[in-house]
Amino acid sequence: MDVLDDVQDGDLFRSFFWGGFECSTHRRADGRRLDLLSATGHDRHADADYQLLAAAGIHTVREGVRWHRIEAIPGRFDWSSLLPLVQAARATDMQVVWDLCHYGWPDGLDIWSPEFVGRFARFAAATARFIGAESDTAPVFCPMNEISFLAWAGGDMGYMNPFGHGEGDRLKCLLVRAAIAAVDAVRTAIPRARFVYAEPAINVAAGAPVAEEQAAARSYHLSQFEAYDMLSGRLRPELGGAPGYLDIVGVNFYPYNQWHLGGATIPFGRHDYRPLHELLVEFHDRYGRPMVISETGAEGSARAAWLHYVAAEVRQAQALGVPVHGVCLYPVLDYPGWDNDRPCDVGLLTARDADGRCGLHRPLVEELLAQRARLPPARPKPRVYAATGVAKGIASHG
């Protein structure tokens, strides 16, 4: 499979800044399944959420396709959980990057069984056909969210499904095979579909100037490339990878993505904290593909400052020739924490009130508007929506 050199990458996304809705559906170690689209109410208020984002100049979002709801019975697809999101996107002219698997799969399906890869591919093809029938634009999919993290958390640490220990490498290979099969299935159904991946960008530094520790830290740092190396056929070619499976390379980057080997997070500003633009250059030098920041964000009062930092680093990377096509604010809506349901104040959109309405985190809104003003001149603007209340006030700054 060849790299997709014939695509006009300058027109990949409708807005440079995206909103990503937390859509995890995994099972925790206590057996509880998470469904964050439901827990945040986004699946019931997508139209209003999209209108708020559009008023802030965001016209591209990441969403989850909840496999466990759609294919609860093997081979039977119930689209009732997805249709409202598709309809809301169409009504607001919102471009969606659809996550086909965001950590979760249907009950009764053993991920270690030979059935898993084929069933996921069939689900991916069916989803592509359904979304394609509801839209006249080329769909964009994230086949498998954070292969590296799921392999570690679910394969080595027993933190989430499938609750493995010492199985991280095996799970990573399986997830890569599933992603490849999904891409093939979607391309057969809709040849013009595009694909974004989302893998953590990390920096692991030695905690002491000891040769063995420096070598171990370097090895850990390089492990972040394994999933992309497998997808592109550079590593474990028997999995079926090839360069053409890497369409758009996404990196997820948060304040805690840098740490000392076996130790604590590296504080921003320390001498061994690597600037984000250096990590982006490293990814682009390795793969040479269009890139996005597929997730980034901070909590509480750090939200605006973190966007300020990330946007400046992206501009620096672009000046060095890295084709970064978007930055996804993730999660763009406050959500209840995975482990204890604590309120996680991370979003541009705040938690809903009793009537289902979201508020806005004003400092992050203002920083987003400031960063939008620093973007190069845009192509023809998406259509403008009627906005009310606070949304109208945001639109006036655009």
Image (cartoon, rainbow, N blue to C red):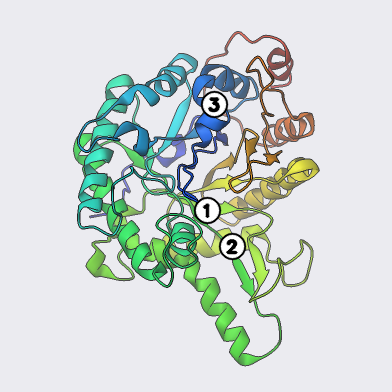
Name the kind of residue labelled 2 in the image.
Answer: Leu
Q: Which of marks 2 and 3 is nearer the N terminus?
A: 3
Name the kind of residue labelled 3 in the image.
Answer: His
Give the answer, above or below, for where 45 lies relative to 321: above
In percent of width and height, residue 239 lies at 25, 64
**Which residue lies at the image location 71% right of the left edge and 20% below the top edge?**
394
Local packing at callout 2 (Cα closer than 10 Å; few below 14, some 14-19, many 20+) is: some
Give the answer, above or below, for where 126 lies relative to 380: below
Name the kind of residue labelled 1 in the image.
Answer: Val
- Residue carrying label 1: 251
Q: Which of marks 1 and 3 is in front?
A: 3
In the rendered image, the quadrant that contains the C terminus is top right
**Disc 2 to disc 3, C-alpha distance:** 33 Å
In the rendered image, the quadrant that contains the N terminus is bottom left
Q: Quadrant of residue 207?
A: bottom right
Q: In the rendered structure, find residue 279 and report the number of the disc placed on it.
A: 2
Number of marks? 3
In percent of width and height, residue 324 lies at 54, 47
Instruction: Determine whether the residue tagged by mark 2 lies in a helix, strand or loop.
Output: helix
Q: Left or right of 202: which side holds 198?
A: left
In percent of width and height, residue 356 lies at 63, 18
Local packing at callout 3 (Cα closer than 10 Å; few below 14, some 14-19, many 20+) is: many
- Residue carrying label 3: 42
Q: Please, which residue is most extreme toward the bottom here?
A: 211
In front here: 114 or 175?
Answer: 114
Q: Which of marks 2 and 1 is in front?
A: 1
Asked if marks 2 and 1 touch (Cβ < 8 Å), the reply is: yes
The answer to whether any part of residue 207 appears in the image is: yes
Q: In which quarter of the image is residue 304?
A: top right
Q: In the rendered structure, find residue 129 and report the number of the disc placed on it.
A: none
Q: Nearer the viewer, mark 2 or mark 3?
A: 3
